[in-house]
Structure formats: C-alpha cells, structure tokens
Amino acid sequence: MRADTSDFDSIAEVTCLVWDDPTTFCRIVVPPAWRADESRRFGMAHHIEEVRWLDVLPWLDREGGTEWLRALPSAAAGVPANLLASAADFAITRHSAWRLSHLFPSLAADLRLDTLGLSVRASNIFVREGIAKFGELGPLSIRDLFLLRSSGALTVQGVVERLISVAVRPTSEKRRSDMAEPALSTFAEVEQRVWTTAEATSVGEALHAVAIWNSALGLWDAPLVTASPPGLTLPPSVEAAQSVLSNLTAGAWFVARDAPPALSDVLARHLALLSEKELVIVRGRVLAKSPQTLDQIGKTLGVTRERIRQIESKVMTRIASWVDDASDLGLFSLAIRAKVHRLSRLASMLEEMPQLTHGIVGLDQPAWFVLDRFDDSFESDGTWIAEPSIDELRAETALRFQAAEIGPGLAPMVSLRESTMDWTALNDGDLEDWLEDCGYRPLEGHFLAPSVKSVPDLAASLLQIRGVACSLDDIHSAVVADRSIGTLQNALNVDPRFVRLDRSDWGLSEWGAREYTGIRDAIELIVQERGSITIDELISDLTSSFTVSPRSILAYASAWPFALTDGVVQMAAAPKVVQKSLSQTRNVYRVGPDAWALRIEVSGEHLRGSGSPLPSSLAAALGMMPGDRMSVESPHGPVTLSWMTLQPSLGSIRTNLLEADPEIGSEVLMTISKTAISFSAPSVDGDRIRRARSLMGLPDSPELIASDVAVAVGLSSAAPWSTVVHVLRDRGESDLASLLVEIVGHNPAYDLPSKLVAKSKYSIVSIEDH
C-alpha cells in the first residue's frame, strides 16, 4: 500500500492503490487522535511511501524509462511538459489498444471533458460524437480516437497528454469513487481486519492479507497467489484469503464490479463509429449472406462504383484494426480460437459461449457471424467453425487421411482419430460428420476418400476391409447397391486386382488364392493334368475347393470337351452333335437360306448390357461347335456369340435395343446370319395375317401360305397346316398356333394329341430340318 502524502500530520485521507487491480484505489480516513499518536505514526511509516508515476499509471513500465520510478511532482510544481509528452508517446505507441478507462483508472467517470483544456478540434469532435464525460470516453481506446472523423495525430496526442496531467494530480477529486474500497475509521481497524478476520470479504483484502503475511515471512519477491512454504501454520485471515484467491472465478470477480461488455455491445460500439454510408457498405458487402455488387450499392447511395470501392477499402482497414489481438474485439477472437482448437462444431461452441448468439442492434445477424466476417483468423460455414479457415482445415484433413491410409483411399476410423487428435478436439461422432462433409464415405469402421467411387475401387476397398472372400451379392449390397449386379461382375472380371475364388465368391489377387474360372475350366485343368479321373474323385476334388454341386460337375463332365465313359472322365476326341432340331426350338424361324429370326422378350439384363442365352440349335445352324466364339456385325458394332459352356450365349445388344427403345417385357425380333445381325419390333397392329408373318420374321404380305410357314418353323415346305400347328404347340408357341388356326380355319386334326397324329413324312418325328 502506498500513500499520497509528504506531511503525515496534516492529512486526513490517504489514497492507496490495491495491487490486485490496478484500476482500484482505496481511501483510509485518518482521525486526529491517530495523527497525534506517535506509535501509530511509527506503524504507519512502515506502510506509506512516496507516490510514483508507476503507482498511478502502472502501464509506464521500466521500458518506458527510469523517470517513471520517481515520485510525482507536487501540485504546486506541476508536471513538466517533456514528461507529459513522453508518457503520452509511450501510451500511444505501446498501449493504443487499451481502453482509456484502463489507461487512466484513477479518473472519475463524471469528470467533464470541457474542464480539461482540450484543443478546439478535440472539443468539437467530442461534442459531435456526444461524448461529454470521461465515463463516455473511457470505453474507447487510443486507436479508436484515431478513427474518429477529423481526428489527427496532434489531436490524439493532446487528448492523451491532458488525461495524463489530470490523472497524476495529487487531488482526490478525480479518483474513481465507484471503484473505491469502504473507508476505515482507524488504523487499528485496518490491522484488525487484516489479522483477525477469519474471512476476507474482497479480493483486494485477500491480496493485502497475503501480502502482509509474505512480508512478515521475508518473502518480498514471492508471487502472492501461490501456496505458503510447507510446515507453516497460517493465521485464519491468511488462510481465508488464500481460499478466496484460489477459488476466485470470473463470476465472483464481477459480483462487485461492472461486468465486461458483451461481444454484441462491443461490436455495436464499433459499428456506431461508422458513417451512414460506411454502414450501408458494410451491411451490403461484408455482412450480407449474398453480397451486393459495387454498382448496386453505388446506385443506392448515388455515387460511382469506384467511390464505393474506395470507401470499402478504407472501412476494411479500420475493421482490421478493430480485431487486432491487442484490441477488445481481438480478445473475443482469441477466446473463440482457444475454444475452437482448430476445428469445432459451431453449435457446440455457441452452447459454451452463449453471448456469441446475441443479436446486435440494427443488424439481423448474431454476434458470431459479424465477428466472423470482420476477422480472418477464423471462419464458420454455419455448421463448423475453423481456424483459420474451412478450406485450410479440409486440406489438412486430406493430409491426415493420407497418413492414416492402409490402402489406396482407405483409412480406418481408429487411425483417423489418432491422426487428428493433436489438432482438433472433435468427438468421434463429430469427426465422422466432418469427414462426410469433406466427401469421405464411411464403410464398416473405415472411411473412403472421395476419389474411391468406381465400382471396382469400392469392391476392392470392401474386400481389403473384410480380408475374406465375399459373394457378389454381399459386395453389391455393401457398396454398389445403386448399380446392377451384372455391372459389378463385369467390373470384377476385367480388373486384375480381383480373382474369382468360387462360383459366386471373389477375393483380391494379392491374397494368392487358387482362382476359380468356372466348372468347365476346373474340370479341364484336372483332366489334362491326370489324363483321366473317375467322376467320384472329380466331384470330391471340386466340392472341397469350390461351392459347386455334384450335379453341376456331372453335367459339365458329360458335355464337350469331355467324355464320361463307365464313370471315367477324359478329354473328348470330337465335339458332340447337338440333338435338338430347329423345329423343336421355341421362337426360332428360318427367314432365308442362311438366316434365322429369334424372337426374344426384352429383360432388364438386356437393357443393362448383360449377355443372354442363345439356343444351341441356332448356334449349330450358324456353324458353331462347343468351344467356338464368333462375331457378327450389327448396325451399332460387332456382337459376340460364344459357346464356351453348356449353353451358347449372345453378347450385349443394349446399344442396338436403344434405337427401338423397347420396354421391359416387350418383344424384339433378331435376324441373324453367319455375318450380320439386325433388330426390329414385331407388329402388333394390322390384320391377323400381317401380325402372324411379323411374329415369324417373314416379309410383309397379305397372304399366308402353308409352305412359307412350314419352312419358317423348320419343316418341309410340303408339311400341312395340322403339322405346323402341332409343332408350334409342342415347342410352346400356343398363341401363334391359335392365331394361325383363326386365319386358316378350324380342322379337327388340330385338336388331336401329337402322339395320335399319323406318322408320315410330314410328322415332326420323321421330318428332318432344312
């Protein structure tokens, strides 16, 4: 405690600084009886010394010069002009972001500015801004003074000098009475409160009690807010004081003091410094969610776009100074960044700092939004808040993801948590949401990079995660449910990363497992290695390696290119002849010497580009044998026909179907020869004769001749209508047979069962195919 006195016997009041708060002074009233008591004078001498510059203006630290360690001049002597100028320079250059109330805590709030002897320009500025007392000036900083319209360097220098000259006056009238401690009547009361009161009632008293205790222990340089040396028994007052200090909270501190202004109030105060034009520009260009153009604001204000640009540039420079780390807004920004820890969910941040949600008078946006637009040190997109920007955190996330990858574009969530925990405090749920917002896809405890989106890449990631073979259905439902299973199978077939491990199971080639290429290839590999094998051994071998039924193995071992004789499987010497004739094949019609028509029902597999079965009798008519592959030309490129398994197949005809744009379930007629294939839609309109001819691929004609129809269904041209009708019924074309009966008239022979029809050269069992 330091007192402002040179003649102890003549004073009735001592003004003291309380060191827990450089803005707080206390007064001790000294009664006459005390002043006459020599013992009390002796005791007071231990606590009173000269008041120095630093005692009144504590921001004048040693770097400002040794003259600030000297005592203040007396009122009669006055303050030398050079010291005033030096102190003002120090405040302007070192502490321009401090509020004036912090720089000059001893000035009374009701101190009238017109009594300070300010310059005419400074007085006019304050009158225009509505600032008449120091309590209205105190919330501003020196930097804010420079931003006032018409304010210049000399004006600000003069204001600061006048404030300093008043602050160092040795009169109590300019002290801030609202911050003073209650007066004490006697020095004995001071001592009693310090040493015998078991509870300190203020932070100032608590600090003072601890300071006296430390001085008694000789601990002059020890920090006050620390534990006392071990083994000491503390007086009750000191113990209570230490408890007050150790449990001090911001809420408790401001119980007896004015709470600091909320962020919304600080922003409103700064915005109030803007002119009407500047505020329109800030609202339209900075704070608007959809910023206006320079031209739009220029039309509103009646000035050119270039003038708007100039004003905006100056305003943004001022705003940048508002959010400097040393400013009041900068303090809020630092607090937000400390809470963000590089990345946080905005809702969580607002729950912890509710004042950020407060609105600002005259604006529709909350305080956090305005500060975000003013300050480039952090950014929010409404969901997340990041330091310094969302884009930079997305880039950082990409680097962290790459560091956690166990395969191309694949990283376990556990590794991602470990990789990101040093730069974000997001919990697992928020981290997963952030990754998804960045385009990463969750998959069974892992995440996939945005680049992993093709069918084979997704399938490879799933197999790598599971580490075991998966069926097509499993892969399809897990990662590519929006694509056809045929597309998935085609992708796996052509990608060298995959190997088929069973009829329906797939794995990764890097696993080194035995590849399954089909029952036929598996049988052929075994038979070629051994020369021959019994059917029982073959079934045992294949069923132990692959998921395949004994019946399928038996069927393949009995067909080309194998021969099954007396239970032994060998390679066949020649292909087997197809037994089924064209006349027995449904929906196949001969339309020329070397051309046939095949009527098919369009399915989803056709439209998705998958292959489809081809009747074996038609493949044989085209000159194919088991094991053959051929290509025919179509209007949209070659179409492949293959006979590599028991059933011949036709390659994709999707592009040819698209031209006719058929629906699923409709019929299409394919006309095919050894060199070409074409497509058309059978007619469903017109008379019955034309409709029947169209269904069989015959040229349009008003007549229907029995010989033409007989040849079309694979019979002799001499076959009668009754034979044609029975052939169509036997091969499953009852609708076409009924249409022919309607055309040629009913005949009792049509109704006889096939086996009761007299055998003749026209019979389906005796007539050979053309």
Image (tube, rainbow, N blue to C red):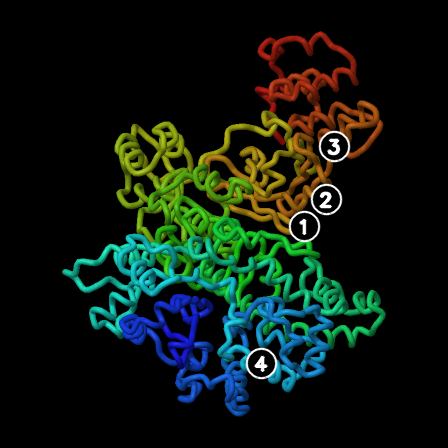
For the residues marked 3 and 2, what is the alpha-carbon distance in whole angstroms?
A: 15 Å
Q: Residue at x 52, y 46 (%)?
A: 629
Q: Earlier in the sequence, mark 3 or mark 4?
A: 4
Q: Quadrant of residue 68?
A: bottom left
Is label 2 in contact with label 1 (beta carbons under 8 Å)? yes
Q: Position of residue 630 (x, y in %)?
A: 55, 47
Q: Which residue, given by chain and number where applicable, does mark 4 sit on?
A: 160
Is label 3 in contact with label 2 (beta carbons under 8 Å)? no
Is label 3 in contact with label 1 (beta carbons under 8 Å)? no
For the residues marked 2 and 1, what is the alpha-carbon distance in whole angstroms?
A: 10 Å
Q: Which residue, given by chain and number where applicable, does mark 2 sit on?
A: 659
| 734 displayed left or right of 350 | right
Judged by depth in the image, the label closer to the viewer, 1 or 4, is: 4
Q: Residue at x 65, y 83 (%)?
A: 155
Q: Which residue, given by chain and number where applicable, does mark 1 sit on?
A: 636
> In the image, is residue 201 above or below residue 475?
below
Which element carries disc 4, helix, strand or loop? helix
